[in-house]
Image: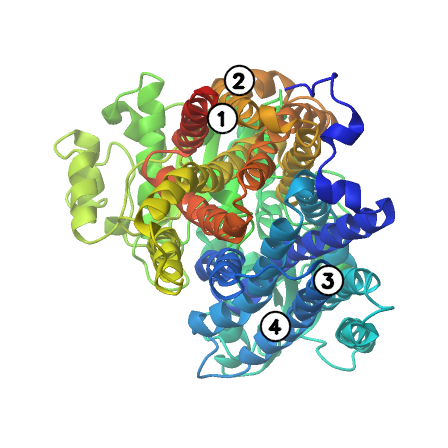
């Protein structure tokens, strides 16, 4: 795809490029860069704010439906702004719509927070969707106009768009850490207003009144940001008061005596709150985005006299139960994944473990526990035997060469959106068939995996994937049950199920000792399982039947399915451990079918509408058929690259994060690498001549498809040997893989715009932009649908197939074009 050397610059330069001064082009591209920077950063900011305001699984639906505004904005331009602005008015039009975006960002942030205080609409996702749709709708209009006005420099515009988005994905971490989510929204309104002022500068002399709205938007965003930094307006988010579905609401308002938030921290990871209780001063709770509480106990720092709260843990929390029976050689070291406020560290310390490594993914929790060392006995700072690591637990484990007597996880679910598409959870990779094998591989011969789960469902699913993993290691179900015991099933509020998997089988006398202790502590034996116990009423009858082989787990799964619960095993390829219900989650299904229906509408309605509103002319039916035949390949192009880009992007992010750890930073660097590569590819595509457009599309699409298929097999082969390296080196390897792929993915879109211009079909550019925008949202939902149903590898393969279709379509178009 090399530009021809026999063309002179004057011959190859696009007309608009030749007629536009370098300073004007520079202002245009900087403006596009700022808008794209702001909108990608705002998208991520929204996911953080919404995770605080509402339940996490609705975040995906709201953000996706809001992003449909990008596509709908393009359709609006095509249907209701059919006439391109005159050359002297173009920058005025850009300044107008950029100003509207700049105002819509802070206003939507303010209203979104205010909605959270209204009981009647706080949980109504429709209000959030309509509200957040607005800034993306105006952005869609702006970009559609840009590509229609300047199609010959579409490569540079799209490149600036992608590079701006790339830096936005990286910069948002710094802004969220520095300002918090609300002030970040105001700051992004300010940067967008700066773009509006840049556009207005091009028409200020002739139409100075057009600069009034850009100036007003800039002043408005600046005043909001400055005043709010000093706490004059929105210094809080209604995480607490108005959403009864949030755990923190129940803690603050549903207890007999009051509780209060004593500290709040915002970062790219989310909002972390520390709550203290007047009724129970010996315990505080740490909440992430109002959910997933992690207790922090008052501890004297003396293991011999730890205090009442810590002492009570031994009899009231199932997580301590295994420590009663550990011998000296079974408590040399422990790995705790997700220590939260330090409860599991306390259990291990009081249980006599000599060396403790605790891995926590949220740095704000670690800093909070360290800061309150005087309250919690300095469990993260004052004990030489305790080492705290900030990392993702599974990734940390995979990099270790040593083995542990104990691997412990307690209540490891964060009900908050962490990922790009707003659906997957940070902890997904902690419980898969491969993760169980990782845990077993890192246990000593006398070691055990100990998991305290939230409920029966997660305990049963954990049992299912453990049995499957052991089966893969050549251990039958009958033998596997000799390595397992469970207790606390269906025990009611305050008692969490415990699952223990030992690397080697328990002995009959060991099982009996545990059963006796169970009875002593007051747990019901029929809500527990221990191997070798056959007496009636000694253990849970269903688990006993499973262990004996008289009942298969397939029958259990079928019974659960009839109750609407999904107990199928999950793997690293489809790591949706916490997907409880059979079928697709409601938010995913909603977005998929709505975006699918909208895609059909944007494909079929615009041509019909234009035909009905155009004046009839002789020979019009034949002309319509000819036009339809000419535009159809472009329709397929923009649909397929919209869907295919998201299939590849989201699938690769999920696969890479498993190997990189540090989910927030990793996601940012992944997006930055892929989008920067795509931006560079778009800029380079501008060097191709008009005669090379079809060849450029087919070659790039084929290369993307081949590379995506290769990566399905190559990523594990490359990153498994690199796991022991420093995070920076692993990220470098990831960047080197993603930038070339992104570079190739950056070709088809701007070349498709130029192809429309070359055929004098510029009027269809806003329509194609709209199709691509809706296709991107459909692609994100389709990725989750495929991943849940089959796996992320299959989603990646489907993305490659989309690009293969593009290749085949434009190979045919290239052949047709060459026919005399």
The Cα–Cα distance between marks 3 and 4, rounded to whole angstroms, is: 12 Å
Q: Residue 594 sits in which quadrant? A: bottom left
Q: Earlier in the sequence, mark 1 or mark 2?
A: 1
Q: Residue 166 sits in which quadrant? A: top right
Disc 2 designates what residue?
A: 714
Disc 3 designates what residue?
A: 188
In this rendered view, identify the residue nearer to me: 615 or 565.
Answer: 615
Q: Is residue 410 left or right of residue 523?
A: right
Say if mark 1 contacts mark 4, CB within 8 Å.
no
Q: Residues within 10 Å of mark 1 (few under 14, many from 20)?
A: some
Q: Earlier in the sequence, mark 1 or mark 4?
A: 4
Query: Considering the numbered disc 1 on the image, is that residue within a helix, a strand or a loop?
Result: helix
Q: Earlier in the sequence, mark 4 or mark 2?
A: 4
Image label count:
4
- Above or below for 689 versus 146: above
In this rendered view, identify the residue nearer to me: 252 or 127.
Answer: 127
Q: Which residue is at the far front?
A: 618
Nearest to viewer (mark 1 / mark 3): 3
Q: Residues within 10 Å of mark 4 (few under 14, many from 20)?
A: some
Residue 488 shows in this picture: no
- Residue 528 % position (x, y): 29, 46
In the rendered structure, find residue 235 and report the number of the disc placed on it: none
Disc 1 designates what residue?
A: 438
Q: Quadrant of the N terminus?
A: top right
In this rendered view, identify the residue nearer to me: 529 or 644.
Answer: 644
């Amino acid at each position: 795809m090399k530009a021809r050397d026999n063309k002179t610059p004057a011959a190859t330069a696009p007309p608009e490029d030749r007629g536009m001064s370098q300073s004007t082009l520079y202002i245009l591209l900087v403006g596009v860069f700022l808008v794209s920077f702001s909108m990608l950063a705002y998208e991520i900011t929204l996911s953080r704010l919404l995770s605080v305001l509402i339940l996490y699984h609705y975040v995906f639906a709201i953000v996706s439906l809001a992003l449909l505004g990008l596509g709908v904005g393009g359709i609006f331009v095509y249907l209701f702004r059919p006439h391109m602005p005159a050359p002297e008015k173009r920058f005025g039009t850009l300044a107008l719509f950029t100003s509207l975006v700049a105002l819509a960002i802070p206003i939507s942030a303010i209203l979104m927070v205010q909605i959270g205080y209204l009981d009647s609409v706080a949980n109504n996702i429709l209000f959030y969707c309509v509200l957040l749709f607005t800034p993306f709708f105006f952005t869609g209009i702006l970009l559609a106009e840009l590509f229609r006005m300047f199609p010959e420099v579409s490569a540079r515009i799209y490149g600036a768009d992608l590079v701006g988005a790339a830096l936005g994905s990286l910069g948002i971490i710094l802004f969220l850490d520095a300002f918090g989510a609300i002030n970040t929204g105001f700051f992004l309104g300010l940067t967008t207003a700066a773009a509006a002022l840049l556009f207005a500068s091009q028409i200020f002399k002739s139409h100075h009144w057009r600069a009034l709205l850009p100036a007003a938007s800039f002043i408005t965003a600046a005043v909001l940001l400055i005043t709010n930094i000093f706490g004059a307006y929105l210094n809080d988010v209604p995480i607490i008061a108005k959403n009864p579905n949030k755990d923190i609401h129940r803690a603050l308002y549903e207890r007999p005596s009051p509780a209060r938030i004593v500290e709040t921290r915002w970062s790219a990871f989310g909002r972390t709150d520390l709550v203290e209780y007047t009724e129970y001063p010996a315990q505080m709770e740490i909440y992430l985005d109002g959910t997933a509480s992690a207790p922090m106990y008052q501890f004297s720092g003396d293991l011999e006299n730890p205090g009442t709260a810590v002492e009570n843990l031994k009899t009231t929390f199932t997580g301590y139960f295994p420590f009663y029976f550990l011998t000296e050689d079974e408590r040399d070291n422990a790995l705790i994944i997700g220590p939260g406020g330090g409860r599991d560290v306390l259990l291990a310390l009081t249980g006599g473990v000599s060396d403790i490594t605790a891995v926590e993914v949220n740095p704000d929790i670690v800093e909070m526990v360290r800061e309150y060392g005087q309250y919690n006995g300095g469990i993260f700072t004052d004990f030489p035997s305790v080492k705290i690591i900030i990392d993702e637990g599974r990734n940390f484990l995979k990099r270790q060469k040593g083995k542990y007597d104990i691997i412990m996880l307690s209540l490891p679910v964060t009900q908050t959106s962490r990922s790009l598409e707003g659906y997957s959870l940070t902890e997904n990779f902690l419980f898969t068939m491969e993760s169980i094998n990782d845990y077993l591989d890192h246990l000593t011969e006398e070691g055990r995996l100990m998991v305290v789960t939230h409920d029966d469902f997660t305990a049963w699913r954990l049992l299912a994937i453990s049995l499957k993993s052991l089966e893969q290691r050549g251990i039958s179900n009958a033998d596997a049950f000799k390595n397992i015991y469970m207790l606390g099933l269906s025990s009611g509020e305050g008692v969490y199920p415990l699952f223990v998997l030992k690397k080697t089988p328990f002995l009959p006398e060991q099982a009996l000792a545990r059963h006796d202790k169970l009875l002593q502590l007051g747990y019901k034996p029929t809500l527990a399982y221990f191997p070798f116990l056959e007496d009636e009423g000694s253990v849970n009858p269903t688990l006993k039947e499973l262990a004996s082989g008289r009942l298969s787990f397939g029958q259990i799964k079928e019974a659960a399915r009839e109750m609407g619960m999904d107990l199928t095993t999950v793997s690293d390829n489809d790591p949706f451990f916490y997907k409880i219900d059979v079928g697709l989650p409601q938010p995913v299904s909603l977005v998929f079918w709505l975006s699918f229906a909208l895609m059909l509408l944007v494909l079929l309605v615009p041509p019909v509408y234009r035909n009905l509103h155009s004046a009839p002319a002789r020979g019009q039916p034949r002309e319509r058929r000819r036009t339809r035949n000419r535009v159809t390949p472009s329709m397929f192009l923009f649909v397929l690259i919209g869907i295919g880009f998201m299939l590849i992007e989201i699938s690769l992010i999920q696969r890479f994060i498993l190997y990189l750890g540090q989910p927030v930073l990793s996601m940012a660097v992944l997006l930055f690498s892929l989008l920067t590569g795509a931006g560079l590819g778009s800029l380079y595509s501008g060097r191709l001549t008009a005669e090379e457009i079809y060849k450029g599309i087919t070659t790039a699409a084929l290369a993307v498809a081949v590379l995506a298929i290769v990566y399905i097999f190559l990523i594990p082969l490359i990153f498994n040997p690199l796991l022991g390296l420093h995070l920076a080196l692993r990220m470098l390897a990831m960047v080197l893989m993603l930038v070339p792929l992104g570079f190739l993915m950056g070709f088809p879109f701007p070349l498709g715009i130029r192809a429309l211009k070359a055929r004098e079909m510029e009027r269809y550019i806003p329509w194609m932009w709209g199709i691509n925008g809706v296709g991107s949202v459909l692609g994100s939902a389709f990725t989750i649908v495929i991943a849940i149903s089959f796996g992320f590898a299959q989603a990646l393969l489907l993305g490659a197939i989309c690009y293969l279709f593009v290749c085949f379509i434009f190979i045919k178009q290239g052949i047709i074009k060459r026919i005399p």
